[in-house]
Amino acid sequence: MTLPNTLCAPVAGHPGPLSVLVVDDSAIVRQVLSAVLSEKRGFRVTTAADPFIAMDKMKKFPPDVILLDLEMPRMDGITFLEKLMSQNPLPVVICSGLTGPRTEVAIRALEIGAVDIITKPKVGVRGFLEESAVLLEDTVRAAATARVNRFQRRRIPSSNRHQANPTIPPAVLAQSAHQREKIIAMGASTGGTEALLQVLQQMPEDCPGIVVVQHMPEGFTAAFAKRLNGLCRIDVREAADGDKVVPGRAYIAPGNRHIFVRRLGPSYFLEVRDGALVSRHRPSVNVLFRSVAHAAGSHAVGVLMTGMGDDGADGLLEMKQAEAFTIAQDEASCVVFGMPHEAIVRGAVDEILPLSRIPAAILQK
C-alpha cells in the first residue's frame, strides 16, 4: 500500500483555510470535529471512516493536518501512522478516547511521529465546551506549523534504564551541594514529548529535582511519565499534590491541572490544583515558571522548549528577573519555534541552545 504524495502547506501566508482530514470510525466524532473546525474559524474539514477511505480522500484533498483515531476497523491508527511516517510524513494529531493502561498506545503514536494528542469528544456539539474547542483549534494550528522531519524518533529499549553511560557526569553538581536546593523547571508543547525525552535521558541520578509542564490531555500524562521513567536514569512520575521535590526525580504535571512550586525552608513542594485556562492552557507553563520564580529565585533553572504560542514566555521572564538561569531551545532544533521565540523577544532568555546542548547547560549552572 502506497500513500499519496501530499505537501503540507504552512500556516503563515496560507492562501486559504487549513485543510484537515478527520479519520475516525465514529460518525458523531466526525460531526463534532467538523462543526468545531468550521470554515468561519479558518478550517476546511474532510472526513473518513477508516484509513483506506482516508487514503482516497488524500489524493483529492491533500491535508495540512490529519486528526487520527487509533481504534478503527480494517486498519488501526497505529498501522496507518507508521505507513504515513515512513512514506509521506505529515502533521498528525491523535484524537483518542483511550483510557487507563490503553493510553500507552497514544504515547506510542508520539514515538512514531504524531505531533500531539487531544481527547476525543464524548458528547455532541452543544456539549463540547468552549475551552475544549479552543484547545482543539490551537492544537490543529500548532500541528500545521510543525516540521515533522525534525522528529528524531529514538527507539531505546527500557533495559537502558540506569546503565552507566551518562553523557554528563554527576560531578558537575558538586559546587552547589552545600547551597539551598536547586530546582529545574521545564515547559514544552508541540514536539515536546521527544524533546523532553532527549533532555531527561542525559540527567544523572543526583541531578536537582525537575518539574515539567508538557501540554497534554488529562489521562495521558501518567502514561507519558511511565514511558520516560523506563527510558531515563532518573525517576520520572506524574506529579501529585503535596509531593516533595527531591534530587534525581522529574515530576510531570497532570493533564488538566495547574502545578505550582512552593518552598518550605530549604525544600520545595508541589501544589496541583484546578483553575481556569492560563495562556490558553491547563496546565500552563506560565503558572509553573511564575511559582518557581517566587519560590526559588536564583536557585532555579528555567527551560522553554518547542511549542506554538507564548505559554511560558512571561513566566520565564519572571524567572530571569528573579535571577534564575533561563534557556530557550533554538529554532533549528524545535518542531515549532513559537514559545521559545516569544521568550527571546521578551528578553527572557540567558542562552539560546540546540536541544543537544541543553542538558549540559542545565547542570553547569
Image (cartoon, rainbow, N blue to C red):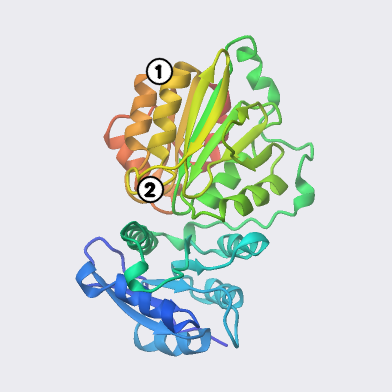
Quadrant assignment for the N terminus: bottom right
Upstream in the sequence, badge 1 or badge 2? 2
**Going 51% across and 54% down the picture, which residue do you hit?**
218
Q: Secondary structure at mark 2?
A: loop
Residue named by callout 2 = 281
Farthest top residue in view: 178
- Residue 284 placed where, x, y %? 41, 42
Nearest the viewer among 190 and 262 is 262
Q: Is residue 32 above or below residue 174?
A: below
Label 1 is placed on what type of residue?
Glu
Horizontal side of residue 198 vs 235, given as left or right: left
The location of residue 11, given as percent across then percent down, is 28, 63
Is residue 351 at all visible to an observer of this figure? no
Mark 1 and mark 2 residues within 8 Å of each other at the beta carbon: no
Q: Which is nearer the eye, 73 or 54?
A: 73
Q: Which mark is residue 57?
A: none
Res 23 seen here: yes
Residue 214 spot, x, y in % from top left: 49, 46
Residue at horizontal 62%, vertical 13%? 175
Disc 2 packing (10 Å; few <14; some 14–19; many ≥20): many
Circle nearer the viewer, 1 or 2: 2
Judge whether 271 appears above or below 192 on screen.
Answer: above
Where 115 falls versus 22 (above or below)? Answer: above
Q: Residue at x 61, y 77 (%)?
A: 79
Q: Amino acid at mark 2?
A: His
Looking at the image, residue 156 sits to the left or right of residue 118; the answer is right
| Secondary structure of the residue carrying numbered label 1 | loop
Q: How far is the residue under mark 1 from the one under mark 2?
A: 26 Å
- Asked whether 318 or 283 is in front, the reply is 283
Residue that carries the numbered disc 1 in the rendered image: 323
